[in-house]
Amino acid sequence: MIKQNLLTGFLTGIAANIAGVILYITLLSEADIDTTLKNAVANDYLGKIIALGAILNFIPFFVFLKKKQNYHARGVLLATVSVAVAVAIYKFI
């Protein structure tokens, strides 16, 4: 049961991060999503966009905490840390 709750929280965190990236690009970029992501990779600022998208993880994290679903919240936190590590690895490679 604990593993399932962690997985649910992790997937929620990844989905929130993806939604945050799409929302950021939609609201603040003049180009479409595909062009913006290609430019981000070419100009080496993809990590910054992903990090800004991770801000949306606050919503499910605090909702899970308020509902006393601590393992779900831990899963969201694990997703956030995993994305941060992936961005750090991406920056150094």
Image (tube, rainbow, N blue to C red):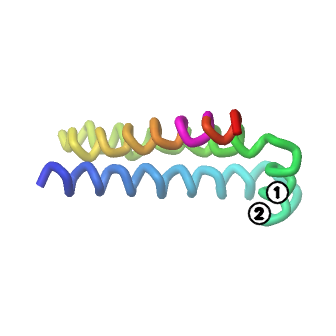
Q: In which quarter of the image is the N terminus?
A: bottom left
Q: Residue flagged by tag 1: what amino acid is it?
A: Thr
Q: Examine the residues drawn in magenta and state their main secondary structure.
A: helix
Q: Is residue 8 left or right of residue 43?
A: left
The magenta-colored residue range is 84-88
Mark linked to residue 18: none
Query: At x 66% / y 41%, what residue is drawn?
Result: 90
Quadrant housing residue 47: top right
Residue annotated with mark 1:
36
Pointer 2: what residue? Answer: 33
Tell me, yes or no, whether the highlighted magenta stretch contains residue 85: yes
Name the quadrant of the C terminus: top right
Query: Residue 54: x percent and y percent?
Result: 55, 42
Considering the numbered disc 2 on the image, is that residue within a helix, a strand or a loop? helix
**Viewer-proximal residue among 62 and 9:** 9
Instruction: Judge whether residue 10 is colored magenta.
Output: no
Estimate the x, y position of residue 69 in percent, counting from the top left. 20, 44
Q: Answer with the quarter of the image where residue 58 lies.
A: top left
Q: Decide: marks 2, 1 in contact (CB < 8 A)?
A: yes
